[in-house]
Amino acid sequence: MVGKRHDINTEYGITPWNAGRLEVGVLLGILANIIPTIFYMLIHIYYDQHLLNRIRNELEASCVQTDADGRTRNISVATLKEKCHLLHATFKEVLRHHALGSSVRYVREDTLLDGRYLLRKGMVVQMPMAVLHRDRGAWGEDASTFRPDRFLQHSLDHTGKKWEAGFGVRVSAFWRWYFIVSGETCGKARDHGSRCHDGAQV
C-alpha cells in the first residue's frame, strides 16, 4: 500500500511535504480505527467459545485452503465478506458497540423534527453514535447486549441506525482492513495455544 500511494502521489505531482501530510491522515485511520476495532473484535470472539467455534467452522467451510503438504493453510480474503456471514455480522456488532464518534451535519433549511424540534437553517447538528447504537426503539430490548446474530436477521432493517465509521459517501475506507485482519487472526490462531475466558483451549 505504501508503495502504491507513493507512486500515485508522484504521478500527480504531489510534493514530498504534502505527501507526508496526506500520510498523517492514513496513520490516524490506522491507529484510531483499525487497531482498536481489531482488538475489540478479537476480545469478543475469544471471550465466547461458542461464537469462536462457529466462526472457525464458517472459515473452514468456505475460506480456508490447505496446501498439499497438509500444514500450510491459506485464507481467501476475497471470499470473507461474501461467505463468512457470521464473521461479518460480528464485525458489525463490534462497531455498533464500540464506535464512539459523532456524525455532524449542517442544516441547510429550517426543519421540524417530530413536530416539536425546530432545527434552524445554518445550525450544526451532532449525532453521537453511542446513543444511536443503544436505541431500544431501533435495536430492541437487548440493544445493550453483544449479539452478532442480530445482523443475520435479513428482515431487520438497520438503515440509518448504524453509523460506525461514517456513512453515505463518508464511509471509512479502512473498514475492510478490520474485517480482513480479524478473519485471518481467527483462522490462524488455533496453533498458538490461546484460551477463552473460561479456560477452554482454542
Image: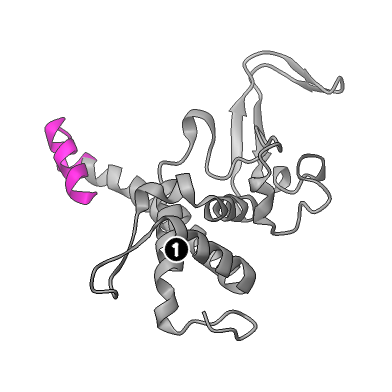
Rendered residue at 61%/73% (across/down):
49
Note whether 124 is above or below 174 in the view shown. above
Give whichever of 152, 166 is nearer the camera: 152
Give whichever of 35, 72 is nearer the camera: 72
In this view, which residue lies farthest toward the front?
68
- Stretch of the chain drawn in magenta: 1-18
Rendered residue at 69%/35% (across/down):
157
Task: Pinpoint residue 72: horizontal percent, then vertical percent.
Answer: 28, 71
Query: What secondary structure is marked by label 1?
Result: helix
Give whichever of 36, 103 is nearer the camera: 36
Dominant secondary-structure state across the stretch colored magenta: helix
Whether residue 19 is visible here, answered yes or no, is yes
Task: Pinpoint residue 43: horizontal percent, then vertical percent.
Answer: 56, 69
Q: Which residue is mark 1?
A: 60
Does the stretch in magenta take in 16? yes
In this view, which residue lies farthest toward the right?
116
Relative side of 164 to 11, left or right: right
Task: Pinpoint residue 88: horizontal percent, then vertical percent.
Answer: 53, 51
Rendered residue at 67%/37% (across/down):
158
* Amino acid, disc 1: Glu
Q: Quadrant of residue 137?
A: top right
Task: Pinpoint residue 191: horizontal percent, then vertical percent.
Answer: 40, 80
Q: Quadrant of residue 172?
A: top left
